[in-house]
Amino acid sequence: MKEKLEHLSAEAERALSTAEDRNQLMQVRSQFLGRKGKLTLLIRQLGTLPEQERPLAGQLINQAKNSLADKIDHRLAAIKEKEENQQQETLDPTLPGRRLPRGSTHPVTHVNDEITGIFTAMGFQIAEGPEVELDFYNFEALNMPPDHPARDMHDTFYITEDVLLRTHTSPVQIRTMEKHKPPVSIIAPGRVYRRDSDISHTPMFHQIEGFMVGEDISFSHLKGVLTAFVHHMFGADCAIRFRPSFFPFTEPSAEIDIQCVICAGKGCRVCSGSGWLEILGSGMVHPAVFKMVGYDPEQVSGFAFGMGIERIAMLKYGIDDIRLFFENDVRFLDQF
Ligand code: PHE
Protein backbone atom coordinates (compact mmCIF):
# COMPACT_ATOMS: atom_id res chain seq x y z
CA MET A 1 0.00 0.00 0.00
CA LYS A 2 2.77 2.40 0.96
CA GLU A 3 4.60 1.67 -2.22
CA LYS A 4 1.47 2.19 -4.24
CA LEU A 5 0.94 5.53 -2.55
CA GLU A 6 4.48 6.67 -3.26
CA HIS A 7 4.12 5.54 -6.82
CA LEU A 8 0.85 7.45 -7.27
CA SER A 9 2.29 10.56 -5.60
CA ALA A 10 5.23 10.54 -7.97
CA GLU A 11 2.87 10.07 -10.92
CA ALA A 12 0.76 12.98 -9.75
CA GLU A 13 3.89 15.09 -9.34
CA ARG A 14 4.90 14.37 -12.91
CA ALA A 15 1.45 15.11 -14.27
CA LEU A 16 1.48 18.33 -12.33
CA SER A 17 4.82 19.40 -13.68
CA THR A 18 3.73 18.91 -17.30
CA ALA A 19 0.35 20.62 -16.84
CA GLU A 20 0.58 24.02 -18.50
CA ASP A 21 -2.79 25.59 -18.26
CA ARG A 22 -5.94 25.69 -16.23
CA ASN A 23 -7.56 22.82 -18.17
CA GLN A 24 -4.66 20.47 -17.72
CA LEU A 25 -4.49 21.27 -14.03
CA MET A 26 -8.19 20.51 -13.63
CA GLN A 27 -7.57 17.21 -15.39
CA VAL A 28 -4.82 16.33 -12.93
CA ARG A 29 -7.15 17.24 -10.12
CA SER A 30 -9.93 14.93 -11.31
CA GLN A 31 -7.49 12.18 -12.25
CA PHE A 32 -6.12 11.95 -8.73
CA LEU A 33 -8.52 13.66 -6.40
CA GLY A 34 -11.89 13.36 -8.16
CA ARG A 35 -14.63 10.98 -7.10
CA LYS A 36 -13.01 8.25 -9.20
CA GLY A 37 -9.51 9.68 -8.85
CA LYS A 38 -6.59 7.39 -8.27
CA LEU A 39 -5.88 8.64 -4.73
CA THR A 40 -9.55 8.59 -3.86
CA LEU A 41 -9.85 5.00 -4.96
CA LEU A 42 -6.88 4.13 -2.77
CA ILE A 43 -8.91 5.12 0.30
CA ARG A 44 -11.57 2.67 -0.73
CA GLN A 45 -8.97 -0.06 -0.70
CA LEU A 46 -8.16 0.60 2.96
CA GLY A 47 -10.61 -2.15 3.86
CA THR A 48 -8.31 -4.73 2.35
CA LEU A 49 -5.56 -3.92 4.90
CA PRO A 50 -5.13 -5.55 8.27
CA GLU A 51 -7.05 -3.52 10.81
CA GLN A 52 -4.10 -2.08 12.75
CA GLU A 53 -2.49 -0.73 9.59
CA ARG A 54 -5.55 1.15 8.46
CA PRO A 55 -5.29 4.37 10.53
CA LEU A 56 -1.73 5.08 9.49
CA ALA A 57 -2.41 4.26 5.85
CA GLY A 58 -5.51 6.50 5.91
CA GLN A 59 -3.44 9.32 7.35
CA LEU A 60 -0.77 8.96 4.70
CA ILE A 61 -3.29 8.91 1.88
CA ASN A 62 -5.00 12.03 3.25
CA GLN A 63 -1.66 13.79 3.58
CA ALA A 64 -0.82 12.94 0.00
CA LYS A 65 -4.25 14.14 -1.14
CA ASN A 66 -3.98 17.45 0.78
CA SER A 67 -0.48 18.11 -0.42
CA LEU A 68 -1.49 17.51 -4.03
CA ALA A 69 -4.59 19.71 -3.66
CA ASP A 70 -2.40 22.51 -2.25
CA LYS A 71 0.03 22.26 -5.11
CA ILE A 72 -2.76 22.38 -7.68
CA ASP A 73 -4.28 25.44 -6.01
CA HIS A 74 -0.90 27.09 -6.01
CA ARG A 75 -0.40 26.44 -9.71
CA LEU A 76 -3.90 27.68 -10.50
CA ALA A 77 -3.23 30.93 -8.69
CA ALA A 78 0.00 31.38 -10.63
CA ILE A 79 -1.75 30.71 -13.91
CA LYS A 80 -4.50 33.19 -13.06
CA GLU A 81 -1.94 35.87 -12.34
CA LYS A 82 -0.12 35.16 -15.58
CA GLU A 83 -3.37 35.39 -17.53
CA GLU A 84 -4.13 38.75 -15.99
CA ASN A 85 -0.69 40.06 -16.88
CA GLN A 86 -1.10 38.83 -20.42
CA GLN A 87 -4.41 40.63 -20.68
CA GLN A 88 -2.69 43.85 -19.73
CA GLU A 89 -0.03 43.26 -22.29
CA THR A 90 -2.66 42.97 -25.04
CA LEU A 91 -3.71 46.62 -24.48
CA ASP A 92 -2.76 48.63 -27.54
CA PRO A 93 -1.63 52.03 -26.33
CA THR A 94 -1.55 53.35 -29.89
CA LEU A 95 -5.34 53.06 -30.27
CA PRO A 96 -7.00 56.50 -30.25
CA GLY A 97 -8.78 57.24 -26.95
CA ARG A 98 -12.52 57.57 -26.57
CA ARG A 99 -13.54 61.12 -27.31
CA LEU A 100 -15.49 63.06 -24.71
CA PRO A 101 -18.37 65.04 -26.17
CA ARG A 102 -17.14 68.55 -26.75
CA GLY A 103 -19.14 71.64 -25.82
CA SER A 104 -19.37 74.79 -27.89
CA THR A 105 -20.16 78.40 -27.13
CA HIS A 106 -23.86 79.22 -26.91
CA PRO A 107 -25.03 81.02 -30.07
CA VAL A 108 -25.96 84.06 -27.97
CA THR A 109 -22.43 84.18 -26.55
CA HIS A 110 -21.00 83.61 -29.99
CA VAL A 111 -22.96 86.46 -31.60
CA ASN A 112 -22.32 88.71 -28.60
CA ASP A 113 -18.58 88.15 -28.98
CA GLU A 114 -18.80 88.86 -32.69
CA ILE A 115 -20.72 92.13 -32.20
CA THR A 116 -18.55 93.41 -29.35
CA GLY A 117 -15.49 92.41 -31.40
CA ILE A 118 -16.59 94.60 -34.30
CA PHE A 119 -17.12 97.62 -32.04
CA THR A 120 -14.01 97.20 -29.90
CA ALA A 121 -12.03 97.05 -33.15
CA MET A 122 -13.49 100.52 -33.88
CA GLY A 123 -12.25 101.78 -30.51
CA PHE A 124 -15.30 101.27 -28.30
CA GLN A 125 -14.71 100.12 -24.72
CA ILE A 126 -16.81 97.52 -22.93
CA ALA A 127 -18.92 98.58 -19.92
CA GLU A 128 -21.43 96.78 -17.75
CA GLY A 129 -24.30 97.72 -15.47
CA PRO A 130 -26.56 95.96 -12.96
CA GLU A 131 -29.52 93.86 -14.10
CA VAL A 132 -31.43 94.84 -10.97
CA GLU A 133 -31.72 98.53 -11.62
CA LEU A 134 -33.20 101.67 -10.16
CA ASP A 135 -36.23 103.24 -11.80
CA PHE A 136 -34.10 106.38 -12.08
CA TYR A 137 -31.52 104.80 -14.41
CA ASN A 138 -33.91 102.63 -16.37
CA PHE A 139 -36.51 105.38 -17.00
CA GLU A 140 -36.26 108.83 -15.38
CA ALA A 141 -32.72 109.71 -16.42
CA LEU A 142 -33.57 108.51 -19.92
CA ASN A 143 -36.25 111.15 -20.21
CA MET A 144 -39.11 108.82 -19.24
CA PRO A 145 -40.83 110.34 -16.19
CA PRO A 146 -43.26 108.15 -14.19
CA ASP A 147 -46.32 108.81 -16.36
CA HIS A 148 -44.52 108.59 -19.71
CA PRO A 149 -46.44 106.45 -22.25
CA ALA A 150 -43.20 104.85 -23.51
CA ARG A 151 -43.04 102.95 -20.20
CA ASP A 152 -45.92 100.85 -21.44
CA MET A 153 -43.70 98.93 -23.86
CA HIS A 154 -41.21 98.39 -21.06
CA ASP A 155 -43.39 96.67 -18.50
CA THR A 156 -41.10 94.65 -16.27
CA PHE A 157 -40.65 92.83 -12.98
CA TYR A 158 -40.63 95.18 -10.00
CA ILE A 159 -38.76 94.33 -6.81
CA THR A 160 -40.00 97.47 -5.07
CA GLU A 161 -41.58 100.60 -6.52
CA ASP A 162 -38.12 101.98 -7.32
CA VAL A 163 -36.18 98.79 -7.98
CA LEU A 164 -36.79 96.70 -11.07
CA LEU A 165 -35.21 94.34 -13.57
CA ARG A 166 -33.84 96.59 -16.30
CA THR A 167 -35.80 96.56 -19.55
CA HIS A 168 -32.89 97.65 -21.75
CA THR A 169 -29.15 98.29 -21.57
CA SER A 170 -29.62 102.07 -21.97
CA PRO A 171 -29.21 102.72 -18.20
CA VAL A 172 -25.52 101.87 -18.73
CA GLN A 173 -25.32 105.11 -20.77
CA ILE A 174 -26.34 107.10 -17.69
CA ARG A 175 -24.11 105.21 -15.26
CA THR A 176 -21.10 105.59 -17.56
CA MET A 177 -21.59 109.29 -18.27
CA GLU A 178 -22.11 110.00 -14.55
CA LYS A 179 -18.67 108.55 -13.88
CA HIS A 180 -16.66 109.64 -16.91
CA LYS A 181 -16.08 112.97 -18.62
CA PRO A 182 -16.51 113.10 -22.39
CA PRO A 183 -15.33 111.89 -24.83
CA VAL A 184 -16.66 108.37 -24.21
CA SER A 185 -17.41 105.55 -26.62
CA ILE A 186 -18.84 102.49 -24.95
CA ILE A 187 -20.36 99.17 -25.87
CA ALA A 188 -22.46 97.54 -23.12
CA PRO A 189 -23.77 93.99 -23.52
CA GLY A 190 -26.06 92.35 -20.98
CA ARG A 191 -29.31 90.70 -19.97
CA VAL A 192 -32.57 92.62 -20.01
CA TYR A 193 -36.11 91.73 -18.92
CA ARG A 194 -39.61 92.48 -20.19
CA ARG A 195 -43.11 91.20 -19.61
CA ASP A 196 -43.20 89.47 -22.97
CA SER A 197 -43.37 85.91 -24.19
CA ASP A 198 -44.08 84.58 -27.67
CA ILE A 199 -42.30 83.20 -30.73
CA SER A 200 -40.09 86.30 -31.00
CA HIS A 201 -40.02 87.50 -27.36
CA THR A 202 -38.72 85.93 -24.16
CA PRO A 203 -39.03 87.49 -20.68
CA MET A 204 -35.23 87.63 -20.53
CA PHE A 205 -33.09 88.40 -23.53
CA HIS A 206 -29.78 90.09 -24.36
CA GLN A 207 -29.05 93.53 -25.71
CA ILE A 208 -26.00 95.45 -26.71
CA GLU A 209 -25.99 99.16 -26.09
CA GLY A 210 -23.53 101.46 -27.73
CA PHE A 211 -22.88 105.17 -27.60
CA MET A 212 -20.31 107.72 -28.58
CA VAL A 213 -20.28 111.16 -27.01
CA GLY A 214 -17.86 114.02 -27.45
CA GLU A 215 -17.46 117.35 -29.20
CA ASP A 216 -18.93 117.46 -32.70
CA ILE A 217 -20.28 113.93 -32.86
CA SER A 218 -22.96 114.07 -35.53
CA PHE A 219 -25.57 111.95 -37.21
CA SER A 220 -23.01 111.15 -39.92
CA HIS A 221 -20.92 109.40 -37.29
CA LEU A 222 -23.94 107.36 -36.30
CA LYS A 223 -24.55 106.41 -39.94
CA GLY A 224 -20.90 105.63 -40.59
CA VAL A 225 -20.36 103.47 -37.50
CA LEU A 226 -23.61 101.52 -37.85
CA THR A 227 -23.19 100.98 -41.58
CA ALA A 228 -19.72 99.61 -40.94
CA PHE A 229 -21.18 97.33 -38.27
CA VAL A 230 -23.89 95.94 -40.58
CA HIS A 231 -21.39 95.31 -43.34
CA HIS A 232 -19.10 93.41 -40.99
CA MET A 233 -21.98 91.43 -39.52
CA PHE A 234 -24.09 90.65 -42.58
CA GLY A 235 -21.68 91.14 -45.48
CA ALA A 236 -20.41 94.13 -47.44
CA ASP A 237 -23.25 94.00 -49.96
CA CYS A 238 -26.07 93.94 -47.40
CA ALA A 239 -28.43 96.86 -48.15
CA ILE A 240 -29.34 99.06 -45.19
CA ARG A 241 -31.84 101.85 -44.54
CA PHE A 242 -32.40 104.39 -41.77
CA ARG A 243 -36.05 104.84 -40.89
CA PRO A 244 -37.30 107.74 -38.71
CA SER A 245 -38.46 106.53 -35.30
CA PHE A 246 -38.99 107.69 -31.74
CA PHE A 247 -37.24 107.05 -28.42
CA PRO A 248 -37.65 109.43 -25.46
CA PHE A 249 -33.88 109.53 -24.93
CA THR A 250 -32.77 110.27 -28.49
CA GLU A 251 -33.62 113.07 -30.92
CA PRO A 252 -33.72 112.59 -33.82
CA SER A 253 -34.17 108.81 -33.67
CA ALA A 254 -33.83 106.19 -36.35
CA GLU A 255 -34.39 102.50 -36.62
CA ILE A 256 -32.10 100.58 -38.91
CA ASP A 257 -33.38 97.98 -41.31
CA ILE A 258 -31.33 95.55 -43.33
CA GLN A 259 -32.35 93.87 -46.53
CA CYS A 260 -34.25 90.69 -45.66
CA VAL A 261 -31.67 87.91 -45.28
CA ILE A 262 -34.23 85.27 -46.26
CA CYS A 263 -35.60 86.65 -49.56
CA ALA A 264 -32.85 89.18 -50.35
CA GLY A 265 -35.37 92.01 -50.48
CA LYS A 266 -38.01 90.38 -52.68
CA GLY A 267 -40.56 90.13 -49.89
CA CYS A 268 -41.40 86.98 -47.89
CA ARG A 269 -43.17 85.77 -44.75
CA VAL A 270 -40.24 86.63 -42.47
CA CYS A 271 -40.14 90.30 -43.56
CA SER A 272 -43.95 90.46 -43.96
CA GLY A 273 -43.51 91.14 -47.65
CA SER A 274 -41.59 94.38 -47.11
CA GLY A 275 -38.14 93.10 -48.05
CA TRP A 276 -36.67 94.75 -44.91
CA LEU A 277 -35.90 93.59 -41.35
CA GLU A 278 -35.50 95.91 -38.39
CA ILE A 279 -32.27 95.23 -36.50
CA LEU A 280 -31.69 98.12 -34.12
CA GLY A 281 -32.81 101.42 -32.61
CA SER A 282 -30.61 104.48 -32.55
CA GLY A 283 -30.51 108.25 -32.40
CA MET A 284 -28.72 111.36 -31.21
CA VAL A 285 -28.59 111.52 -27.41
CA HIS A 286 -31.37 113.82 -26.17
CA PRO A 287 -30.22 117.10 -24.49
CA ALA A 288 -32.38 116.23 -21.46
CA VAL A 289 -30.27 113.08 -20.96
CA PHE A 290 -27.02 115.10 -21.05
CA LYS A 291 -28.44 117.45 -18.43
CA MET A 292 -29.30 114.49 -16.20
CA VAL A 293 -25.65 113.36 -16.10
CA GLY A 294 -24.19 116.85 -15.82
CA TYR A 295 -22.94 117.13 -19.40
CA ASP A 296 -23.49 120.46 -21.20
CA PRO A 297 -25.63 119.79 -24.31
CA GLU A 298 -24.16 122.97 -25.85
CA GLN A 299 -20.67 121.49 -25.58
CA VAL A 300 -21.15 117.80 -26.37
CA SER A 301 -23.22 115.70 -28.67
CA GLY A 302 -23.38 112.02 -29.39
CA PHE A 303 -25.25 109.08 -30.73
CA ALA A 304 -26.57 105.92 -29.10
CA PHE A 305 -27.94 102.63 -30.33
CA GLY A 306 -29.32 99.41 -28.91
CA MET A 307 -29.94 95.98 -30.42
CA GLY A 308 -31.22 92.59 -29.35
CA ILE A 309 -28.56 89.90 -29.59
CA GLU A 310 -31.03 87.04 -30.08
CA ARG A 311 -32.66 88.95 -32.91
CA ILE A 312 -29.34 89.43 -34.70
CA ALA A 313 -28.53 85.74 -34.14
CA MET A 314 -31.93 84.69 -35.53
CA LEU A 315 -31.41 86.73 -38.68
CA LYS A 316 -27.83 85.64 -39.11
CA TYR A 317 -28.56 81.91 -38.70
CA GLY A 318 -32.15 81.76 -39.98
CA ILE A 319 -33.62 80.69 -36.61
CA ASP A 320 -37.37 81.20 -36.50
CA ASP A 321 -38.19 80.77 -32.80
CA ILE A 322 -36.37 82.78 -30.13
CA ARG A 323 -37.29 80.23 -27.46
CA LEU A 324 -34.82 77.73 -28.98
CA PHE A 325 -32.00 79.78 -27.44
CA PHE A 326 -33.19 79.00 -23.93
CA GLU A 327 -34.34 75.39 -24.17
CA ASN A 328 -30.71 74.23 -24.12
CA ASP A 329 -31.43 71.30 -26.41
CA VAL A 330 -27.98 69.96 -27.26
CA ARG A 331 -29.10 69.08 -30.80
CA PHE A 332 -29.74 72.79 -31.38
CA LEU A 333 -26.69 74.09 -29.52
CA ASP A 334 -24.37 71.60 -31.23
CA GLN A 335 -24.86 73.38 -34.55
CA PHE A 336 -22.87 76.43 -33.50
N1 PHE B 1 -33.07 101.05 -25.49
C1 PHE B 1 -33.84 100.99 -26.69
C2 PHE B 1 -34.76 99.77 -26.61
O1 PHE B 1 -34.47 98.87 -25.87
C3 PHE B 1 -32.96 100.90 -27.90
C4 PHE B 1 -32.18 102.14 -28.13
C5 PHE B 1 -30.95 102.33 -27.54
C6 PHE B 1 -32.66 103.14 -28.95
C7 PHE B 1 -30.24 103.50 -27.75
C8 PHE B 1 -31.97 104.31 -29.18
C9 PHE B 1 -30.75 104.47 -28.58
O2 PHE B 1 -35.75 99.68 -27.28
Image (spheres, grey):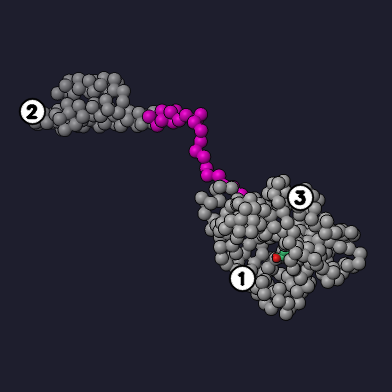
Q: Is residue 96 magenta?
A: yes
Q: Residue 287: where, in percent of width, then height?
A: 85, 69
Q: Which stretch did the figure color magenta?
A: 83-105
Q: Would you place residue 287 above or below residue 258 in this image?
A: below
Does the beta carbon at disc 2 come under 8 Å from ligand 1? no
Can the viewer see residue 86 in this picture? yes
Query: Quadrant of the rendered structure where residue 127 is?
Result: bottom right
Determine whether label 1 and label 2 are within 8 Å by CB: no
The rendered magenta stretch, by its main secondary structure, is classed as: loop
Asked whether 234 or 99 is in front, the reply is: 234
- Image quarter where ligand 1 lies: bottom right
Q: Which mark is residue 172?
A: none
Query: Quadrant of the rendered structure where residue 176 is?
Result: bottom right
Residue at (60% x, 68% y) in the render = 196
**Image-based side of 103 in relation to 246, left or right:** left
The type of residue carrying mark 2 is Thr
Query: Quadrant of the rendered structure where residue 82 is?
Result: top left
Mark 1, Cα crowd under 10 Å, few <14 / some 14-19 / many 20+, is: some
User: Which element carries disc 1, helix, strand or loop?
Assistant: loop
Mark 3, Cα crowd under 10 Å, few <14 / some 14-19 / many 20+, is: some
Asked whether 303 or 79 is in front, the reply is: 303
Q: Which mark is residue 195?
A: 1
- Residue of label 2: 48
Q: Is residue 99 magenta?
A: yes
User: Which element carries disc 2, helix, strand or loop?
Assistant: helix
Mark before the other along the chain sequence, 3 or 2: 2
The type of residue carrying mark 3 is Ala
- Residue of label 3: 228
Name, please, the residue furthest toward the bottom. Answer: 147
Residue at (79% x, 59% y) in the render = 211
The type of residue carrying mark 1 is Arg
